[in-house]
């Protein structure tokens, strides 16, 4: 409150007077009042980021606020010196940088969401948990998969997927969950370090053309060492007894494999745009989004046609037809048979009079049997005005054209019984907010084959209908991680503003001149365990110190894996602390920080050895 009041008071004065008083000439911005205030805002905002899970304030909010205020203060300082254009031009430059990364990440997140909606990741998790591996094997398998998947699926998504596997197989074993989650975090961050698509920091380095696509592969060996060394130490503490086998089956939805191929094709398109055509990679990703857009239309058409009957609604396709088979067999009296059918069922005679209205039908419609039997009111629970039900149409030998007219939303001939039809629809009068009902009508015939009535079996598929909503690419875009995208906006603008004040130039001159590139890059990696690696990397890219190719690879490695030192040092660690609350904690991770640090230092040494010629 005091800071806000001070800002309001200060901003109420003319900008020129304030600039004169505090010496706000552009050359002196780093030592001006506005510069110091901007540093304070930046520090305050980023102190709140690691506390996100503690104070329940999304990390994007304070960073966006700080970004806006820093540029406001910068504009005032420039206006005070008589420069009305420099701040705007600089801000537009930062916005262009953000726009490119935003579009790239938005497409990648949309594809990940699409694969999740098609049950790609759920199917992988189900396959793993049903194998019956020992805990020791689960530890190594989840770590290896995290290391291999994160270069394409990003480290956060990979960590959440592997974390779900660990929780499903050993949720009650808190010690194992903690060890496995630490291993997953280290592996996912390490795997993301040698691919431009594995982490936001590597993507920034690639888009700035500091490291080429193929050159990232030089980090594969150091990244593997970064994971394997601490994993080997932690595995000694893992129990080797097999957990209880979990039976879990998940089938991928229509189009899942095609979407995976389209995602790989989209990545290839972005690489071609960037490396061969010298166009922004984001433009290639947006072209790739159109691949998904057209295929989403194909999925919608496929599922839209199939949704006309109950099979698409998520239940076994023949569940309604079991009672129909029993009716066809006529092994019991019709009265006893209909009453014992668990699905809502009613029957009418050749005069369209209700003869049976079982208990399940009474529960579904809210109308007891005594009010329906003997009447021709079978339409009342379903329609606002009198009209024929499917059973009525069958009794009257109505041709298929008439049935099609009554059920434009979709129908089909029943595959199990002659002259029977299926249809489905939404009935707003059923329940509190309406219900999706699938129904099947079957004619009842005497021994001579003459129709003497009809029976109709209904099923409530409201819950299943919600689960299989049409695939919609706009919904997949809407479900992107917007907090992360907005946080990234705040980071770029905050760091860009501080660069305009001159702080990054001063910091770069100090750390890279006095300490040397190798030590400086190693220390920045350690810093990323406390301060988010995104601002750390963006600051280095903004400073753009004169470094060799090997040093740019080193800073890419250290900022990518440095966050593994603490559970709050990376998005993967923070996310797993939330999903494995109480089992994977800050202190549990801190206990193994020494061996993770050993892996970090070993990775640096391996890189210095492998890339000695380009250091």
Image: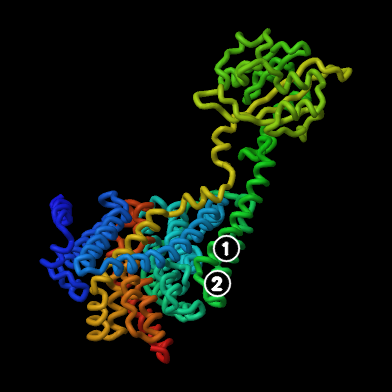
Q: Residue at x 68, y 7 (%)?
A: 374
Q: Nearer the viewer, residue 80 or 7?
A: 80
Q: Position of residue 281 (x, y in %)?
A: 51, 69
Q: Give the left or right position of residue 547, taking residue 435 as reference.
A: left
Residue 234 image-quadrant placement = bottom left
Residue holding disc 2: 273
Q: Are marks 1 and 2 in contact (CB under 8 Å)?
A: yes
Q: Give the left or right position of residue 545, taking residue 355 as reference.
A: left
Q: Nearer the viewer, residue 103 or 422?
A: 103
Q: Secondary structure at mark 2?
A: helix
Q: Position of residue 549 (x, y in %)?
A: 41, 85
Residue 366 image-quadrant placement = top right
Residue holding disc 1: 287
Q: Give the left or right position of residue 340, taking residue 551 as reference.
A: right
Q: Secondary structure at mark 1?
A: helix
Give the residue furthest to the right.
448
Q: Residue at x 41, y 71 (%)?
A: 204
Give the quarter of the figure containing the C terminus. bottom left
Q: Quick check: 331 above or below 604?
A: above
Q: Position of residue 377 (x, y in %)?
A: 65, 12
């Amino acid at each position: 409150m005091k800071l806000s009041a001070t800002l309001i008071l200060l901003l109420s004065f003319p900008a020129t007077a304030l600039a004169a008083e505090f010496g706000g000439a552009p050359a002196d911005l780093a030592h001006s009042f506005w510069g110091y205030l901007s540093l304070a805002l930046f520090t305050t905002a980023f102190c709140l980021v690691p506390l996100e899970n503690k104070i329940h304030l999304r990390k994007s909010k304070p960073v966006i606020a700080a970004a806006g205020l820093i540029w406001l203060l910068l504009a005032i300082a420039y206006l005070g010196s008589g420069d009305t254009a420099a701040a705007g031009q600089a801000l537009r430059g930062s916005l262009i940088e953000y726009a490119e990364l935003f579009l790239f990440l938005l497409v990648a997140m949309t594809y990940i969401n699409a694969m999740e909606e098609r049950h790609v990741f759920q199917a992988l998790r189900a396959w793993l948990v049903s194998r019956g591996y020992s805990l020791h094997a689960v530890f190594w398998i989840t770590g290896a998969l995290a290391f291999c998947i994160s270069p394409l699926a990003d480290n956060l998504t990979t960590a959440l997927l592997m974390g779900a596997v660990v929780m499903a197989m050993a949720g009650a074993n808190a010690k194992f969950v903690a060890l496995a989650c630490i291993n997953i975090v280290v592996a996912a961050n390490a795997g993301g370090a040698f691919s431009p698509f594995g982490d936001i920091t590597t993507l920034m380095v690639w888009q700035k053309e500091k490291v080429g696509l193929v050159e990232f592969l030089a980090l594969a060996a150091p990244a593997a060492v970064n994971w394997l060394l601490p994993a080997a130490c932690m595995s000694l503490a893992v129990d080797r007894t097999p957990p209880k086998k979990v039976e879990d089956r998940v089938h991928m939805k229509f189009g899942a494999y095609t979407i995976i191929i389209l995602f790989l094709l989209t990545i290839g398109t972005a690489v071609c745009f960037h490396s061969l055509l010298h166009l922004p990679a984001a433009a290639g990703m947006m072209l790739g989004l159109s691949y998904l857009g057209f295929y989403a239309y194909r999925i919608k058409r496929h599922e839209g046609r199939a949704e006309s009957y109950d099979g698409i609604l998520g239940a076994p396709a023949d569940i309604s037809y079991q009672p129909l088979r029993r009716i066809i067999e006529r092994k019991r009296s019709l009265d006893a048979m209909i009453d014992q059918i668990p699905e809502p069922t009613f029957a009418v005679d050749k005069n369209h009079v209700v003869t049976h209205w079982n208990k399940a039908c009474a529960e579904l419609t809210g109308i007891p049997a005594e009010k329906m039997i003997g009447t021709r009111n079978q339409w009342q629970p379903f329609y606002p005005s009198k009209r024929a039900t499917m059973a009525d149409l069958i009794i009257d030998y109505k041709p298929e054209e008439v049935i099609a007219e009554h059920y434009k939303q979709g129908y089909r001939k029943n595959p199990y019984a002659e002259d029977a039809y299926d249809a489905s629809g939404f009935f707003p009068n059923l329940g509190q907010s309406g219900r999706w009902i699938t129904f099947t009508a079957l004619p009842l015939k005497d021994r001579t084959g003459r129709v003497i009535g009809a029976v109709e079996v209904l099923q409530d598929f409201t819950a299943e209908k919600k689960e299989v909503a049409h695939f919609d690419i706009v919904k997949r875009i809407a479900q992107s991680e917007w907090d992360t995208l907005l946080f990234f906006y705040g980071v770029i603008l905050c760091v860009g503003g501080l660069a305009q004040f001159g702080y990054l130039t001063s910091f770069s001159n100090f750390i890279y001149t006095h300490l040397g590139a190798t030590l400086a890059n190693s220390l920045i990696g350690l810093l990323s365990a406390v301060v988010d690696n995104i601002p750390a990397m963006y600051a280095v890219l903004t400073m753009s110190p004169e470094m060799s190719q090997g040093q740019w690879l080193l800073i890419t490695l250290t900022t990518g894996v440095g966050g593994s030192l603490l559970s709050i040092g990376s998005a993967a660690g923070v996310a797993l602390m939330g999903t494995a609350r109480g089992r994977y904690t800050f202190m549990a991770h801190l206990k193994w920080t020494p061996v993770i640090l050993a892996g970090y230092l070993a990775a640096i040494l391996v890189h210095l050895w492998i890339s000695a010629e380009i250091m």
